Amino acid sequence: MGEQHRAPAPTGIELAWRSSSHAAHPGAPSGGRRPGPRSGLTLGRIVTAAVDIADREGLAAVSLARVAAALGTATTSLYRHVRSKDDLVVVMRDAAAAPPPDLPPTDLRRWRESLADIAWRIYDLYRQHPWVLQVPTSGPPNTPNELLWGEHMLKALSQSTLTAHDQLRAVTLISGYVREQARLTLDPIIADGGDAAAGDYFAFLGRVLTPKRYPMFCRLFADPANTGSIEYTAADFQFGLDRILAGLAELDRDGRAR
């Protein structure tokens, strides 16, 4: 058949689901493989190599040519498995999410603690793969591992009295909070928020903030205890997470009181 009759390569989302299905059933044939001698190059190897490059050097360093070189193969050979970097990044992002561990039934009864544990695990995954935060996101999650994390949150929330609608809202709230706080943690200026960085930052604010226009900031920063560091710590993450979970617990109490 001529080139014009070849079936189009699957999209990144389709690849993520095929990859997930193959991981769950290792004996299953890879989707889209042509008949003939089995090649050592697989989508799994391609994704692993790409994630390794991104972890070490950032997302910008990833290209099909660079991945092919790392695998010792020609760039054209990757096109049998993935058609573009954009599609590869979708599968990489889902691979970085990694399937969550099963929650023990005893933990499910303590839904608030379960949610805290899940939030921390997702937070740690972002810290292990910071390049994921550079991947633009739009719409709800649609890849297998990302949806599994949501599934685990919903499983924990099913032990509460929150309505189905509020459970989905809670998953969106926690997921968004974790992503944004991980971004803050990994921000170059905040991550290096030692004495020098803090000194530069607060010296700048001292030049531009006036009591007339910013009275609350000026009053706050008049206390040296508030100008020691701009580093974002685990305690900061826990503070916000506790406030979110306390609010959800209040909804749960309201539901049980009805």
Image (spheres, helix red, strand yellow):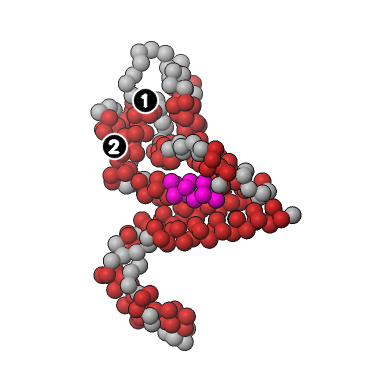
Pick whichever, 162 or 41, lies toward us: 162
- Give the overall secondary structure of the magenta segment: helix
Q: The residue under label 2 is which amino acid type?
A: Arg
Depicted 38 relative to depicted 94: above or below: above
Pick whichever, 70 or 118, lies toward us: 118
Q: Residues within 10 Å of mark 1 (few under 14, many from 20)?
A: some
Q: Quadrant of residue 205?
A: bottom left
Residue in the image at 37% along x and 34% along y: 47
Q: Residues within 10 Å of mark 2 (few under 14, many from 20)?
A: some
Say which mark, if any, is on residue 42: 1
Q: Residue 182 location, x and y as percent?
A: 41, 54
Any part of residue 143 in sight: no
Q: Quadrant of the C terminus?
A: bottom right
Residue in the image at 26% along x and 70% along y: 196
Pick whichever, 100 or 179, lies toward us: 100
Q: Work out how far the residue at label 2 is from the one at label 1, CA to CA, in angstroms.
A: 16 Å
**Residue that mark 2 sits on:** 66
Q: Which residues are magenta?
A: 112-122
The answer to if 121 sits in the magenta stretch is: yes
